């Protein structure tokens, strides 16, 4: 009964979405207030019905309702409760329902918190948002119905993919989807503005919180996925330039560019066309990511489905919305004349350069991700584009971004004297060079990646501190002025500092990792770096729904015990699939990472050990970037400025 109720709620949500797509748009065009007012209750009803549908599907997973085909394919009665719940979205159909649930949530939030929006713009935004929902409701109902029943239910299910039975993967997809789908709001604002032909400072202020929220969720989702890959897959790395990893990274880069571009629209009413284009492309790349994950055209350990037919449907949806928005953009772009002018030496120019670096780096990742597919389709050649290409092609843009970030932050708006503006940074630059030089002196026979990364991290972090000091001005009570800075300024400082820390972590891990693979004998110590490891025992154990080979390895340094490491190699009988559970001793300066392999003919066991410097700096930096975004999002100016503008004027035509 509950399952049928969920299916019926999904169909009703689809019908409500159709009404919301059509009626408010006509009302905004005709200036009919009653028709425009339909958008808000429709958005609430659409979200409530989709939530009911998703809740019904989750209930089916919790109670192991094996009359549902989806539950049979992705659950098992012996599975722990957390993974029964996460199994709801650990598959194609359920994850698409989560995708639409979040889409309707953002639409409902626009209705809840959009009281300061002009009625016409609000109606158009909610109408465009609902148009996207209509496409995905249709996709789910006609090609990916999660409520398909089985005539003869089996006694038990086939279990969830063992790689997904992990806390990191339980929370990674929801956060990632909040970021992916959150960019639909920026897209809806962009298309609504194109239909109206109006983009001004108020529009820039309205679109920024939605973009910022999406960027924060994407940051958290990507960090969780990276952390999961690091400790779960046993490869010892945090990023592999996998197609699905790239699919989440590309919209993150464009969302970061959109955030900075919207600032210029808000402050100076410049870069209007570029900002609209970024809003379209950012959501477009989210749709590209959805296509990559589900089409089966690109092989990935993260892929949800391997169904080219359903991938074509997603490709058609992507083509319709991106193509339609870009056609509308080409028609309206000429009307978006920039009002603010600025010199080559100004904060606006620095933000333009920031945008170009982020956009081009996104394009590099896109080309590297899609080129194997292009080569196979058009040139009949099988190619593999891996980390060497991405590291060589992508890294220079990030180095350039790190170099300009502190400079752009201290430049004034409109016009600046570059030498004068950079004067306070001269000591920062010298100290950053010293940090890089120290790293170079301490390493022997290594690449320049480590020293360059340390220099950039120090340059960005000390640049953030210098900018905050400058904001306090001169005279007494500087500390008081610092504590009264707007939260958006503190958020910017924390996020930029997080980027610097992440750069340091990536550079240190890339440049100074030590790895060792050997056949270890029981109770025979061996050395890796400055540590000594002893394989004490290996035993077979049974988990809730798996069998495991568990090793105990003693980690010591200079005779002192550092940690007892317990790596496992698991086998899931129902899914007939093995997984690796690495044992990691975490530390701020380094991780000791151990993986147990197979038993060898001589009686020993294969043991792989990594000493990974500064790995945790990556997660700390990512957390600080997300925290900075949340601080900015909580700034009072985001909540009241749009209302102040509304009381003074309707959005000014861009002509």
Image (cartoon, grey):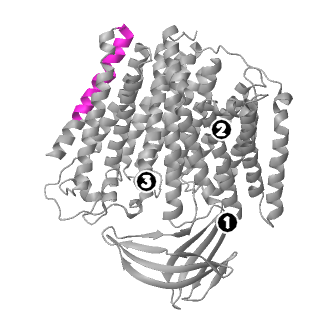
Q: Is residue 408 left or right of residue 427?
A: left
| Mark closer to the observer (2, 3) | 2
Residue beneath the point at 45% across and 55% down = 302
Residue 449 appears in the picture as rendered: yes
**Mark earlier in primary sequence (2, 3):** 3
Label 2 sits on a secondary structure element that is helix
Label 3 – label 1 distance at C-alpha: 29 Å
Residue placed under numbered mark 1 in the picture: 513
Residue 15 covered by magenta stretch = yes
Label 2 – label 1 distance at C-alpha: 30 Å
Per the rendering, the mark at residue 303 is: 3
Label 3 sits on a secondary structure element that is loop
**Mark earlier in primary sequence (3, 1):** 3
Residues marked 2 and 3 touching at CB (< 8 Å): no
Viewer-nearest residue: 315 or 609 = 609
Q: Residues within 10 Å of mark 2 (few under 14, many from 20)?
A: many
**Residue 392 higher or lower than 586, as above or below:** above
Residue placed under numbered mark 2 in the picture: 493
């Amino acid at each position: 009964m509950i399952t049928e109720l969920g299916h019926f709620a999904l169909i009703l949500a689809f019908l409500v979405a159709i009404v919301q797509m059509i009626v408010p748009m006509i009302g905004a065009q005709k200036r009919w207030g009653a028709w425009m007012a339909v958008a808000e209750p429709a958005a609430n009803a659409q979200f409530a019905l989709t939530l009911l549908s998703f809740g019904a599907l989750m209930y089916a997973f919790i109670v192991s309702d094996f009359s549902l085909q989806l539950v049979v394919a992705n659950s098992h009665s012996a599975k722990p409760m957390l993974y029964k719940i996460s199994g709801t979205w650990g598959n194609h159909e359920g994850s698409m329902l989560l995708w639409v649930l979040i889409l309707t949530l953002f639409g409902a939030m626009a209705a809840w918190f959009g009281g300061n929006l002009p009625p016409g713009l609000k109606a158009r935004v909610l109408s465009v948002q609902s148009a996207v929902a209509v496409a995905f409701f249709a996709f789910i109902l006609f090609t990916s119905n999660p409520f398909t029943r089985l005539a003869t239910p089996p006694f038990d299910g086939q279990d969830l993919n063992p790689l997904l039975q992990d806390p990191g993967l339980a929370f990674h997809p929801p956060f990632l989807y909040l970021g992916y789908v959150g960019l639909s709001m920026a897209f809806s604002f962009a298309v609504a503005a194109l239909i109206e032909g109006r983009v001004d400072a108020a529009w820039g202020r309205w679109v920024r919180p939605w973009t910022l929220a999406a960027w924060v969720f994407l940051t958290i989702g990507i960090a969780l996925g990276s952390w999961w890959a690091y400790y779960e897959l046993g490869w010892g790395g945090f990023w592999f330039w996998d197609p699905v990893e790239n699919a989440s990274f590309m919209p993150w880069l464009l969302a970061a560019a959109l955030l900075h571009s919207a600032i210029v629209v808000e402050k100076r009413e410049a870069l209007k066309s570029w900002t609209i284009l970024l809003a379209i492309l950012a959501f477009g790349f989210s749709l590209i990511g959805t296509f990559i994950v589900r089409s089966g055209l690109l092989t990935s350990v993260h892929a949800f489905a391997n169904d080219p037919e359903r991938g074509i449907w997603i490709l058609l949806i992507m083509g319709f919305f991106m193509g339609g928005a870009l056609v509308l953009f080409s028609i309206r772009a000429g009307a978006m004349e920039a009002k603010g002018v600025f010199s080559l030496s100004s904060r606006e120019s620095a933000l333009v350069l920031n945008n170009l670096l982020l956009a081009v780096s996104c394009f590099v990742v896109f080309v590297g991700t899609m080129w194997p597919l292009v080569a196979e389709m058009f040139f009949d050649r099988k190619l593999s584009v891996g980390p060497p290409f991405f590291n060589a092609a992508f890294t220079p843009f990030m180095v350039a971004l790190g170099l300009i970030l502190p400079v752009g932050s201290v430049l004034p708006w409109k016009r600046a004297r570059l030498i004068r503006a950079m004067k306070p940074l001269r000591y920062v630059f010298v100290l950053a060079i010293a940090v890089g030089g120290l790293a170079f002196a301490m390493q022997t026979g290594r690449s320049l990646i480590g020293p360059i990364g340390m220099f950039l991290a120090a340059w960005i972090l000390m640049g953030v501190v210098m900018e905050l000091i400058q904001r306090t001005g001169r005279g007494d009570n500087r500390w008081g002025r610092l504590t009264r800075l707007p939260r958006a300024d503190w958020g910017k400082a924390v996020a930029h500092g997080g980027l610097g820390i992440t750069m340091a972590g990536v550079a240190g891990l890339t440049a100074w990792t030590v790895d060792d693979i050997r056949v270890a004998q029981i109770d025979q110590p061996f050395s890796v770096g400055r540590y000594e490891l002893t394989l004490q025992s290996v035993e077979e154990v049974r988990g809730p729904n798996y069998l495991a080979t568990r090793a105990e390895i003693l980690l010591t340094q200079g005779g002192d015990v550092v940690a007892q490491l317990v790596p496992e190699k698991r086998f899931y009988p129902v899914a007939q699939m093995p997984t690796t559970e690495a044992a990691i001793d975490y530390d701020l300066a380094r991780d000791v990472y151990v993986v147990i392999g197979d038993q060898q003919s001589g009686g020993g066991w294969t043991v792989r050990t990594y000493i990974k410097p500064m790995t945790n700096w990556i997660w700390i930096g990512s957390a600080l970037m997300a925290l900075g975004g949340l601080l900015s999002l909580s700034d009072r100016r985001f909540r009241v400025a749009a209302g102040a503008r509304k009381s003074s004027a309707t959005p000014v035509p861009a002509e």
